[in-house]
Image: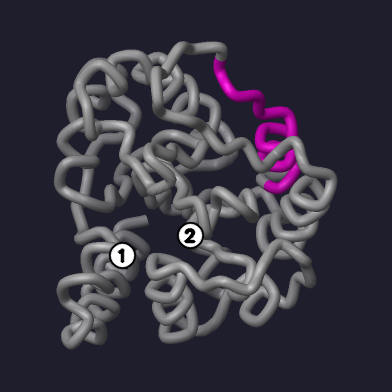
Amino acid sequence: MSFADKAIRYFNELNAPNIKLGVVELMNPYGSIQVKSVVKKFYNKFYNDYGSRIFIFGINPGRFGGGLTGISFTDPVALREKCCIENTLGERKELSSKFIYSLVEEFGGPKKFFSKVFLTALYPFAIIKDGKNYNYYDEKPLAEKLKSEIVKTIKTQIEFGARRDVAILLGKKNAKCFSELNNNFNFFDKVIVLEHPRYIMQYRLKKINLYIKKYIEAIKCIQKQY
């Protein structure tokens, strides 16, 4: 099976876990027929081969990005305008998606970028609390409840075609949580930590070009090690 075949099968068969989360809610876009179609088109367009990728792990999808489209760091506008995949999933742009697709353009466009990189998240569903995005690590009981699901997510996705020598983690807290799991399960030999797109767009917007350069340098440095 190709990278695309494995990814399409995984995402389009995802079901939210039967876990009591209190006031926290999960968004599972993969039950939508349109999202299933989008996932199939996206992965067949950019991942229909047997090559390995550098895995870049975010936290969990945002409600206006991957939480809608089923594609990590990709809002409906980016999906339509940058990936040329038509959809009626909305018109709202997401900050993280705006950063990522600025990076993608600077790297050489979606085809070149996705031939080298797989964007994903440690937890595959958007998490919502009080109508706002929430991170899996924002409260310890939630992180503990989701730990086995996160491990399952990583184990399954690396079988798509991950480079196992190194992975990129976005966000310091995210990387800290991942490092504990990586020490136990030896998913990757090395972890590189970069600032999360949301943080950059919210607090370091004036230096966005420096962060894009930092991301590109990290990716190209890994490529040279292959």
Residue 1 visible in image: no
Residue 206, above or below 186:
below
Left or right of 7? Residue 5 is right
* Circle number at residue 52: none
Range of magenta residues: 4-17
Q: Position of residue 47 (x, y in %)?
A: 67, 56
Find numbered disc 2 in the image and state the secondary structure of the residue it sits on: loop
For the residue pair 138 and 210, the one nearer the viewer reads as 138
Dot 1 and dot 2 residues touching (CB under 8 Å): yes
Residue linked to disc 1: 197
How many other residues sit within 10 Å of disc 1, few (<14), some (14-19) or many (≥20)?
A: many
Residue 15 coordinates in the image, percent (x, y): 65, 24
Tell me what residue is drawn at x 45 percent, y 19 percent. Answer: 149
Report the quarter where the N terminus lies.
Answer: top right
Give the numbered dot on residue 73: 2
Circle 2 residues within 10 Å: few <14, some 14–19, many ≥20: many
Residue at 27 percent across and 73 percent down: it is 201
Whichever of callouts 1 and 2 sits on the residue coming sooner in the sequence is 2
- Disc 1 on helix, strand or loop? helix
The amino acid on which the numbered mark 2 sits, given as a three-letter code, is Phe
5 inside magenta stretch = yes
